[in-house]
């Protein structure tokens, strides 16, 4: 694909519209300014203007905004920080600051274009815990969790988070992080949830022991999302202090290997994932479905198997929480809808939508 300067600039306006829709005016303002202010006066500007790929799909805008946010968090530029604090809002003034920063901090910003944003949102555990409550109510036994697409492992802390989901409490009462989304609809089942272990895998895990990696993860969270900022800073500190069991590897290889290991009697093994299925290859998705179906067919009442997912349904433009448990003939069930970052969760009343679940590349489809 040949570079198209107009298309590449327009990607920042597209991202600004998303930010506006998600109540992030400062990040929207920075994006619009970037679309106007990038120039060939810096290597970063030239890389943006000559971007060879599809800029929206490549998250070009979010790559660069992450770099600018990191500069603000480091206190590297007073003028930029005034923009990020919302003190400078007039378009011409913001454009002037952004244009200057692109040249002044060119060397620091250019590497941010090398890869897509690496995000990890602990708030998504609200959707996952909603699904786990359904399994706990049905099977009434402790859970061991296997997560694919774990990124930096923040959601592997789910056993250390506290939850208030429509008045249903789960997790430690004295948790450092309390997940309390705006709840809509009927609450999930009120069932005791005991998690015996959590382990995960990612194709390119983020090592939060590296201060630069930890700072980059936090910088991708928009400045407007103050609660998310506080939560990710706390979660990063928890991982760095206490650790998580996180491996590097292919999701399908890992799931097949994990399912082949012995399962303790009286413990339910559960595969969990959030906003990652679309990034797997078609073959990888097929292998995981096949492995889970095979293990599900072999599941017994004292060694059951579960599957909880929080994934986008791009056909219906929503994020869905779906659950399945074995041994059972009941197909995957849609039990809740949720905000992409877990700001709200909408519980659904039974009878739940029960359909075989097929997820396509780039999205999901229930049919």
Image (cartoon, rainbow, N blue to C red):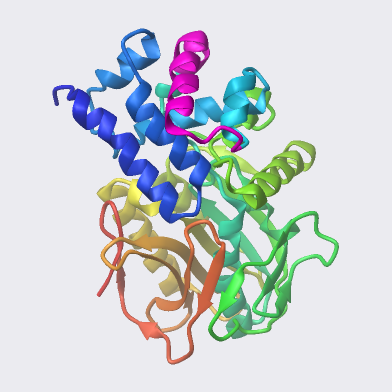
Residue 102 percent location from the top left of the image: 45, 16
Q: How many marks?
A: 0
Q: Quadrant of the N terminus?
A: top left
Query: Residue at point 54% right, 42% down?
Result: 222
Instruction: Give, as a single range, the part of the protein colored magenta.
Output: 86-110
Query: Residue at point 43% right, 27% down?
Result: 92
Query: Residue at point 38% right, 35% down?
Result: 32
The answer to if 108 sits in the magenta stretch is yes
Q: Residue furthest bottom?
A: 351
Q: Residue furthest right?
A: 174
The answer to if 328 sits in the magenta stretch is no
Q: Quadrant of residue 191?
A: bottom right
Q: Residue furthest left?
A: 2
> Is residue 62 at least partly visible in the picture?
no
In-image side of 267 versus 259 (left or right): right
State the residue in front, 59 or 122.
59
> Is residue 102 at least partly visible in the picture?
yes
Residue 103 percent location from the top left of the image: 45, 10
Q: Quadrant of the C terminus?
A: bottom left
**How would you classify the magenta stretch by its main secondary structure?**
helix
Answer above or below: position of 249 versus 39: below
Residue 141 percent location from the top left of the image: 67, 77
Query: Residue at point 59% right, 38% down?
Result: 86
Residue 51 percent location from the top left of the image: 26, 22
State the residue in front, 19 or 94.
94
């Amino acid at each position: 694909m040949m570079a198209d300067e107009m298309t590449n600039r327009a990607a920042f306006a597209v991202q600004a519209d998303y930010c506006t829709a998600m109540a992030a005016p400062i990040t929207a303002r920075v994006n619009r300014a970037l679309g106007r202010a990038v120039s060939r006066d810096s290597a970063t500007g030239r890389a943006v203007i000559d971007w060879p790929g599809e800029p929206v799909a490549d998250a070009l805008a979010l790559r660069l905004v992450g770099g600018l946010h990191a500069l603000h968090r480091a206190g590297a530029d007073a003028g930029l920080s005034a923009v990020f604090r919302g003190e400078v809002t007039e378009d011409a003034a913001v454009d002037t600051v952004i244009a200057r920063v692109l040249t002044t901090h060119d060397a620091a910003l250019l590497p941010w274009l090398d890869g897509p944003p690496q995000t990890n949102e602990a708030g998504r555990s609200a959707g996952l815990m909603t699904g786990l409550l359904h399994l706990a109510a049905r099977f009434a036994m402790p859970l061991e969790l296997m997560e694919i697409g774990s990124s930096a492992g923040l959601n592997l802390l789910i056993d250390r988070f506290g939850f208030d989901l429509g008045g249903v409490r789960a997790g430690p009462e004295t948790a450092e992080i309390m997940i309390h989304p705006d709840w809509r609809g009927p609450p999930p089942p009120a069932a005791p949830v005991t998690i015996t272990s959590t382990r995960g895998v990612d194709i390119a895990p983020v090592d939060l022991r590296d201060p630069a990696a930890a700072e980059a993860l936090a910088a991708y969270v928009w400045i407007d999302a103050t609660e998310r900022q506080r939560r990710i800073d706390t979660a990063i500190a928890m991982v760095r202090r206490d650790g998580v069991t996180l491996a590097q590897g292919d999701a399908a290889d890992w799931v097949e290997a994990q399912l082949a290991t012995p399962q303790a009697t009286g413990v339910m093994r559960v595969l969990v994932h959030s906003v990652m299925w679309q990034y797997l290859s078609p073959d990888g998705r097929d292998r995981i479905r096949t492995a889970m179906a095979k293990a599900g067919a072999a599941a017994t009442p004292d060694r059951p198997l579960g599957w909880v997912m929080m994934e986008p349904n791009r056909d219906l433009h929503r994020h869905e929480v779906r659950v399945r448990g074995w041994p059972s003939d009941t197909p995957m069930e849609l039990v809740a809808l949720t905000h992409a970052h877990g700001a709200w969760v909408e519980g659904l009343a039974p009878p739940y939508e029960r359909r075989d679940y097929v997820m396509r590349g780039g999205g999901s489809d229930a049919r």
